């Protein structure tokens, strides 16, 4: 079975401060990990995926297989980063399992 | 992203009514999915389809049914709606890996 855990439901940071969203997973094989973002009143969209190793909007995430984690980080949060963030895992069957989500609020 | 569309966008209905939510995509993907989003629970998979002849139950399929009318169309039905089916419903499509989501349908069952 595959499972994704996001321990923080809410995260509030000040503009310019670092932000880290935690994601832990359980999966017996080799998963593909994603971060999706949902801005207010908008659809979910892909933020980044671990195989691309890109930095999108200043966010990065590193897959740590030893700790089964895929934490999302940004060194300097911006107000436009306020959104709901979902960590997701895809196994060999191409189904996505989502975490419960973390709501990020960036304060001026 | 108008590649994945859902109708209706909002719907209020009564307990016991039959409801159909529709999803269309122009991305040419074979794989399509239906999720529901509830506060504190994230997105949960209801049904998914990997091609027109393939339909599979997700983790919360009870009370729902689907129809894959064509590669581009995937409908979700609630045969007899109940209040705990009040949620935001998302359709998604994928090729290999990334899923693309529709705008969502907000369903309220009174």
Image (cartoon, coloured by chain):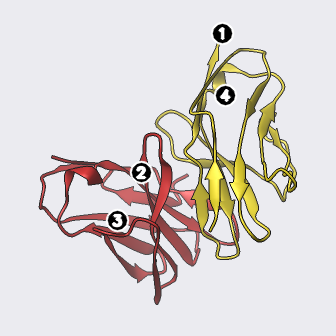
Q: Is residue B50 above or below residue B62?
A: below
Where is residue A86 shown, x and y percent of the image?
61, 45
State the CA–CA distance, disc 4 to disc 1. 12 Å
Where is residue B76 shown, x and y percent of the image?
34, 68
Crowd class of label 2 (few under 14; some 14 to 19; many from 20; radius 10 Å): many
Q: What residue is pinned by disc 4? A: A81
Q: Is residue A12 above or below residue B90?
A: above
Crowd class of label 1 (few under 14; some 14 to 19; many from 20; radius 10 Å): few
Q: Which color is chain B depicted in?
A: red
Q: What residue is pinned by disc 1? A: A108
User: A90 or B34: nearer the eye?
Assistant: A90
Q: What residue is pinned by disc 3? A: B22
State the CA–CA distance, disc 3 to disc 4. 31 Å
Where is residue B82 shown, x and y percent of the image?
19, 56
Asked whether disc 3 touches disc 1, contact meaning CB atoms under 8 Å apart, the reply is no
Q: Which color is chain A depicted in?
A: yellow
**Quarter of the view holding residue B75:** bottom left
Numbered badge on residue B104: 2
């Amino acid at each position: 079975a595959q499972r994704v855990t996001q321990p923080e439901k809410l995260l509030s940071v000040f503009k310019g401060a670092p932000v880290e969203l935690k994601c832990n997973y359980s999966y017996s094989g080799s998963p593909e990990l994603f971060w999706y973002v949902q801005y207010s009143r908008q659809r979910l969209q892909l933020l980044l995926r671990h195989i691309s190793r890109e930095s999108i909007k200043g966010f990065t995430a590193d897959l740590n297989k030893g700790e089964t984690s895929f934490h999302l980080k940004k060194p300097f949060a911006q107000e436009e980063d306020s959104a709901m963030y979902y960590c997701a895992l895809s196994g060999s069957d191409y189904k996505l399992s989502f975490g419960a989500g973390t709501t990020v609020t960036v304060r001026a | 992203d108008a590649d994945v569309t859902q109708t209706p966008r909002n719907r209020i209905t009564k307990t016991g009514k039959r409801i159909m939510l529709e999803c269309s995509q122009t991305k040419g993907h074979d794989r399509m999915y239906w999720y529901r989003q509830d506060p504190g629970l994230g997105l949960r998979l209801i049904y998914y389809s990997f091609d027109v002849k393939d339909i599979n139950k997700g983790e919360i399929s009870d009370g729902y049914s689907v129809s894959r009318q064509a590669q581009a169309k995937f409908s979700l039905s609630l045969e007899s709606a109940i209040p705990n089916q009040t949620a935001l419903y998302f359709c998604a499509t994928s090729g290999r890996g990334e899923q693309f989501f529709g705008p969502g349908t907000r369903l309220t069952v009174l």
